Amino acid sequence: MIKIGVLDLQGDVSEHLEMTKKATKNINLRAKVSMVKTAQEVAECNAIIISGGESTVIGKLMEEESIITIVKQNKIPVFGTCAGMILLGRETNYKQPLMGLIPMKVKRNGFGRQKISFEAEIDIFGDTYPGVFIRAPYAYDVKEEANILSQIQDKVVAVAHNGNLAIAFHPELTEDTRIHEYFLKEVAKCVE
């Protein structure tokens, strides 16, 4: 059985938990999905999800708890949304802890502050998807070994690399499980 941990440090944790459970049912994946907070709990997972929130705070908590070290040592795939995208990058426009798992730079608040939040249909997986952007970042200077999955306004909003997935928007705030399903299928390939 695959173990998926939703990092319970800040953000839409319960929403990601419910969305991931729905996605496992939709693709008939035998998985245990639970909230995790410690490095030991993360070490027992086949993959983790990092939700939105304040990336500096989440990064510092992950660093203090040695979660970043465990993820890197154990090569645990990470799905990061919004703040999670920032943490997956190698460089950002603020000084903060980063995981550096995807070869890209990330601009925090790339589309503007909270009042500039918006919803837009984006193209991903050859179809449209309801993107919910809240103080959203975007990626740039994405190295060619990474796979750009979606762009909006010429800004990269979805990137995959080595089993990791970075999304600028909030799929957990929609009813559409396709992005969670995509990540779970990638994890299942790594576990096989």
Image (cartoon, rainbow, N blue to C red):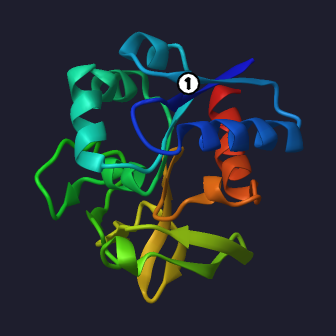
Pick the front one: 145 or 155 = 155
- Residue 173: name its quadrant: bottom right
Question: Mark 1 Cα within 10 Å, few/some/many (few <14, many 20+)?
Answer: some
* Point 34% across, 66% down: residue: 143
Pick the front one: 39 or 57 = 57
* Point 72% across, 78% down: residue: 128
32 versus 176 height, above or below: above
Secondary structure state at the residue bearing disc 1: strand
Residue 121 position within the rendered picture, expressed as x and y whole percent measured from the top left: 65, 81
Quarter holding the N terminus? Answer: top right
Judged left or right of residue 31, residue 155 is left
Pick the front one: 69 or 110 = 110
Residue 27 visible within the image: no
Task: Name the residue type under label 1.
Answer: Met
Residue 60 position within the rendered picture, expressed as x and y whole percent measured from the top left: 21, 34
* Point 16% across, 47% down: residue: 96
**Residue at which label 1 appears:** 35
Extreme residue toward the left, this view: 95
153 versus 97 height, above or below: below
Residue 125 position within the rendered picture, expressed as x and y whole percent measured from the top left: 70, 69
Extreme residue toward the bottom, this view: 153
- Residue 23: name its quadrant: top right
* Point 70% across, 34% down: residue: 188
Judged left or right of residue 38, residue 79 is right
Pick the front one: 191 or 84 = 84
Residue 174 visible within the image: yes
Judged left or right of residue 111, residue 121 is right
* Count of picture labels: 1
Residue 10 position within the rendered picture, expressed as x and y whole percent measured from the top left: 40, 38
99 versus 52 height, above or below: above
